[in-house]
Amino acid sequence: MTTPPVIDLIDLRFAWQDGPALLDIPGFRLEAGERVFLRGPSGSGKSTLLGLIAGVLEPQSGKVEVLGHDMTALSGPKRDALRADRLGVIFQMFNLVPYLSLVQNVTLPCRFSSARRQAAGGEGRLNEEAVRLLSRLGLDGERMLSRPVTELSVGQQQRVAVARALIGGPDLIIADEPTSALDADARDRFIELLNEEAGRSGAALLFVSHDASLASHFDRSVDLAEINRAKGGV
Amino acid sequence: MGFSILGLAWRSLMNRRGSALLTILAVALSVALFLGVDKVRNGARAGFDNTISGTDLIVGAPTGQINLLLYSVFRLGSATAEISWDTYESIDGRDDVAWTIPLSLGDNHRGFRVVGTNESYFEHYRHGGGTQLRVSEGKLFSDIYETVIGADVAKELDYSIGSEIVLTHGLGAGGLTDHEDKPFIVTGILAQTGTPVDRSIHVPLEGITAIHVGWESGTRSPFADTISEDMIRGFDLTPKSVTAVFVGLEQRGSLLRTQRALNTQGGEPLLAIIPGVALGELWQVTGIVERALIAVSVFVIAVGLVSVLTSILTSLNERRREMAILRATGARPGHIFFLMVAEAAMLGLCGAVVGVFLVQLGLLIAGPILSSAYGISIGGLGISAIDGWTVLAVFGAATLIGTIPAVMALRRSLADGLTVKL
Ligand SMILES: Nc1ncnc2c1ncn2[C@@H]1O[C@H](COP(=O)(O)OP(=O)(O)O)[C@@H](O)[C@H]1O
Ligand SMILES: [Mg+2]
């Protein structure tokens, strides 16, 4: 079995515009199905790194390999397609498009990717799949599903974001401080749920946060400072 | 990308319903102004053009040709001088003249013009590209004190066959000097024509003479009361003058020759005009104003389109987050671009379509007023090609304008990546 690593960073260097080097990572790997916690203080470049992995940003040098594809060698549209087809992204907050319903928010990636649409059961079964995912995350019932997303609590919004990341069974989920707006109780339950669902779908998970206390929930924990040689950040 | 992005654009607009509706309204009003000006202009032209056809020349006392046209055909304004009956007879007797319609104008009944004429009017007058006048009820007049009224007169004054009406000397509405002693009896009602005929009361020329017996000096003679109807019938009621004459020629080829002959004849000076030429001159005069109005309304449309731009630009900042979410879930830069352009295009399209309907609504409401105040029929002002082209042009312009916020949103979302610093 030679499944390529889900993420493979090789001599990655990145700086914002004319700023100092923010990231200089000789090597970092995330294996298929692995669930990893990446810790780093605020401003250390975690979100920037996720942007590079998601193919939204381009490094100045080095390689970002995602699911066996060299992101730096791919064209912009191909990177966008890879992200749409095989990645799930969860933000810190404001994850949802305010003018779409819960279900529409969850099926959003399927609008941009036919592969994702097929993987989620095809056009006709999209909504059903979204409802199933939402109910696994504790969001069910006609009344809940018909609420405007702007009326949901932060915790509920984050769970909708998880459902969206999970739809169509992506190979990698990246989560950018998804719990920083939640209270301690909700935070632990959220991480358990995310871990459980990622595990169930077989997706690898890269979870970044400044909060070291979350490390215990994960297979493996990495400090950004350990893998990053640059001191450009904070 | 197609439909799913259009759906997103639509929902995004609905999410900002208030501002979107205001923008749509701004575009709609600007489009409505433009189309309204154009329609009223065309309606007025078509109405005027349809009012007279088949008449080769109009002859009256010397005045401006537009003035003669307006008072003889459209019953707008009034004549300053008349032509004598003898001169009328000499025109009627010319070899190149096939028929004439004498018209005696200047009297009024409750705001409607009284037209003294003869049977020739009903036989030869044509409107709307050759349609003859038709009596829808009753029959033509055959006695001095009989009258045939237009469709609007009957409707608005609630007159029917047999009604007795009293005619006023002069043009003032409900004049003080009603000739109350000598009522006319309605014998016929004309079918609707969409021309000033609908608002006219037609009486025999002799009837006009009769109502002026005792008024020769301009005021009521003290002896007027002593004149009985029988005495009047005994008088020679041949009119002394007429206001204008519609002339039909034996051969249209002689048009210019006959016109010159009438204009230069010895004896009483005359003005003979060709209705189409006079109308052309009228349109030349009004054309300047029309063009100015059209230019202004085009500028107003431009302002409407700027409001589309403003509405989208002001939303850009608060939507950076949304763009990042769309990018994260797989949207390509092209999707972001298309989303913004689609929103602008939808605002433009909705605005233009609403504008078209506003105009139709406006015509529905204002149409009867226009037609009763100016005798202009604005039928045939339904949705036309110009509406379609205007909608298309506004849609196109809005789409083009949408590329400005689209490029801005695109640049920002590329620079932001997944992280939006707010
Ligand atoms: N879009 C951007 N443009 C320019 N600089 C940025 C941008 N995003 C982040 N940065 C800078 O990069 C550094 C790291 O930011 P970020 O990756 O958001 O850190 P973290 O997620 O660890 O808090 C910060 O100094 C920040 O100011
Ligand atoms: Mg961050």
Image (cartoon, rainbow, N blue to C red):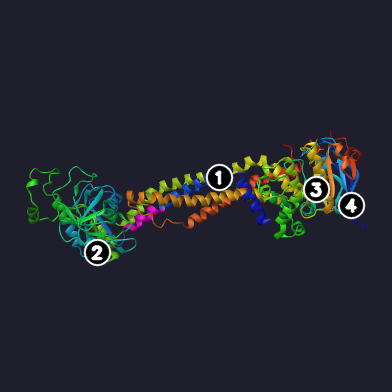
CA distance separating discs 1 and 4: 51 Å
Q: What amino acid is at disc 1?
A: Leu
Residue A199 in percent (x, y) is at 85, 51
Tell me the element at label 1.
Answer: helix
Q: What amino acid is at disc 3?
A: Ala
Q: Quadrant of the C terminus of chain A?
A: top right
Q: Please state the quadrant of the image where ligand 1 appears.
A: top right
Chain of residue at mark 2: B
Residue A174 in percent (x, y) is at 81, 46
Q: Is residue A194 left or right of residue B251?
A: right
Q: Circle 4 sits on which residue? A: A5
How many numbered discs sit on the rendered protein?
A: 4
CA distance separating discs 2 and 3: 87 Å
How many other residues sit within 10 Å of disc 2, few (<14), some (14-19) or many (≥20)? few
Q: Does mark 4 fall on the same chain as mark 2?
A: no
Residue B166 in percent (x, y) is at 18, 50
CA distance separating discs 2 and 4: 99 Å
Q: Circle 1 sits on which residue? A: B21
Is residue B46 a member of the stretch shown in magenta? yes
**Magenta highlight: main SS:** helix
Q: Does mark 1 fall on the same chain as mark 3?
A: no
Give the mark, 4 or 3, whose residue is nearer the N terminus: 4
Residue at the spot 52% in from the left edge and 44% down from the top edge: B26
Relative to B339, is B57 above or below? below
Q: Nearer the viewer, mark 2 or mark 4?
A: 4
Give the mark, 1 or 2, whose residue is nearer the N terminus: 1
Span of residues in magenta: B42-52
Chain of residue at mark 4: A
How many other residues sit within 10 Å of disc 4, few (<14), some (14-19) or many (≥20)? some
Q: Is residue B306 left or right of residue B190?
A: right
